[in-house]
Image (cartoon, grey):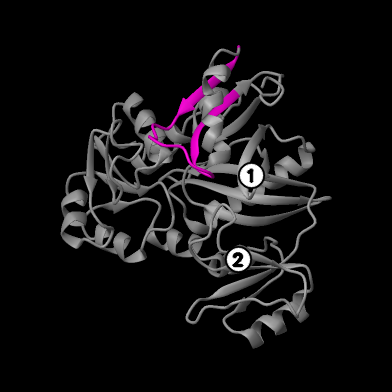
């Protein structure tokens, strides 16, 4: 166990950074946020905030020299940024993990290299490659940019070879076969600097307009499937040499589980752990990157988490008045369509949706 960590640096000032800063404070650890965004959700919570571009080498060096370890709350960070930081301070997870997880093609190649299944896929960079990939994989299929895609961005469903698709020059794509799944689930796994690995219960995820709407934990799946999902998550964490937390999004297809995406940081589907588990994903994240002993992941209460997106923030006061309901505001000044403003977690048996 390391006792030398007194301040951690986090790249990104969104709600994940905010909740990480709150968790770190409870462990007696301060947080220095580096973001290119003014008036970020984390700014009023963190001990210190640096506002500068992610390619500002001088600002990055000064930031690195002010903290004991650096991590991140989103994975679309320029790899060069992490390379600069690593010259001056420990970075967890390692930049190589980001390099894999921020590119859909590299991510799928890596997962398959571990003997773990994904949807069929093919690299695409021009119209001829797209048509060949469609013939190989079949229809319907989904064309995605390999980078900078989340919450449904950067993707289009393909139904026909005749469909007009604009492929941008110099942009790499991946064509994925359509998966007819029964459920979407995710597992949050943590791995410490000493190699200790702990998994949270698999959670079931329900999306609306490609954005996570509701998470139910534990997921309503068999014990055998739950263990298979945990085993997959642990195998990927070990394969990456992860130091931190990782969300593994998966499809349940009968008795088979396919990996969809990886996120090497706290994840929206793990927000319920703040109120339903002995150790939240955010505290676990801090513990892992700081070399502290991992916390107990026991889930003491069933939970259902709902995102409050855009104008749904108006429901926050109503939810707050409900028994066993916990509302977490993100400190964002203005609501707009598709923007995550808060989340609410209902613990116990009753559905948060039914309490509306």
* Farthest right residue in view: 254
Q: In which quarter of the image is residue 135?
A: bottom right
Which residue position holds label 2? Answer: 108
For residue 148, above or below residue 296: below
Residue 44 appears in the picture as rendered: yes
All told, the count of numbered labels is 2
User: In the displayed structure, does residue 246 sit left or right of residue 136?
Assistant: left
Rendering coords of residue 41 (x, y %)? 36, 37
Mark sitting on residue 96: none
Say what secondary structure mark 1 lies in.
strand
Q: Quadrant of residue 183?
A: top right
Q: Is the residue marked by circle 2 packed among few (<14), some (14-19), or many (20+) residues within 10 Å?
A: many
Rendering coords of residue 245 (x, y %)? 48, 44
Residue 5 appears in the picture as rendered: no
Q: Earlier in the sequence, mark 2 or mark 1?
A: 2
Front one among 39 and 205: 39
User: In the displayed structure, does residue 265 sit left or right of residue 154?
Assistant: left
Q: In which quarter of the image is residue 39?
A: top left
Front one among 29 and 331: 331
Residue at image position (61%, 62%) is 111
For residue 259, above or below residue 278: below
Q: Is the residue marked by circle 1 packed among few (<14), some (14-19), or many (20+) residues within 10 Å?
A: many
Rendering coords of residue 179 (x, y %)? 76, 59
Front one among 135 and 203: 135
Mark sitting on residue 186: 1
Say what secondary structure mark 2 lies in.
helix
Residue 329 lies within the magenta run:
yes
Front one among 61 and 97: 61
Residue at image position (66%, 44%) is 208
Quadrant (top left/top right/bottom left/bottom right) for the N terminus? top left
Residue 198 lies within the magenta run:
no
Q: What stretch is highlighted in magenta?
A: 323-345
């Amino acid at each position: 166990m390391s006792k030398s960590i007194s301040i951690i640096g986090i790249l990104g000032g969104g709600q994940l950074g905010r909740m990480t800063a709150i968790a770190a404070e409870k462990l007696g650890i301060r947080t220095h946020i580096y973001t290119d965004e003014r008036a970020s959700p984390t700014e009023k919570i963190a001990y210190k905030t640096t506002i500068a571009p992610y390619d500002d080498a001088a600002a990055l060096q000064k930031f690195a020299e002010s903290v004991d370890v650096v991590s991140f709350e989103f994975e679309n960070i320029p790899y060069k940024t992490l390379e600069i930081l690593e010259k001056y301070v420990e970075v967890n997870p390692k930049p190589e993990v980001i390099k894999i997880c921020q590119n859909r093609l590299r991510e799928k190649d890596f997962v398959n290299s571990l003997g773990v299944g994904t949807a069929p896929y093919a690299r695409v960079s021009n119209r001829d490659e797209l048509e060949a990939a469609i013939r190989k994989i079949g229809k319907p299929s989904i064309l995605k940019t390999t980078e900078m895609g989340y919450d449904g961005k950067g993707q289009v469903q393909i139904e026909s070879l005749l469909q007009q698709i604009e492929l941008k020059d110099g942009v790499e794509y991946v064509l994925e076969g359509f998966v007819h799944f029964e459920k979407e689930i995710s597992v949050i796994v943590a791995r410490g600097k000493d190699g200790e690995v702990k998994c949270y219960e698999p959670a079931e995820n329900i999306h609306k307009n490609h954005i996570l709407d509701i998470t139910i934990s534990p997921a309503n799946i068999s014990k055998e499937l739950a263990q298979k999902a945990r085993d997959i998550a642990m195998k990927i964490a070990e394969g990456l040499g992860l130091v931190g937390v990782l969300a593994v999004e998966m499809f349940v297809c009968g008795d088979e589980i396919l990996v969809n995406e990886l996120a090497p940081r706290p994840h929206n589907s793990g927000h319920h752990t703040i109120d339903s588990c002995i150790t939240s994903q955010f505290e676990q994240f801090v513990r892992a990157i700081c070399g502290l002993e991992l916390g107990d992941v026991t889930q003491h209460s069933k939970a259902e988490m709902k995102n409050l997106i855009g104008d749904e923030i108006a429901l926050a006061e109503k939810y707050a008045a409900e028994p066993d309901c916990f509302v977490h505001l993100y400190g964002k000044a203005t609501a707009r369509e598709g923007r995550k403003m808060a989340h609410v977690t209902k613990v116990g048996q009753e559905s948060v949706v039914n309490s509306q």
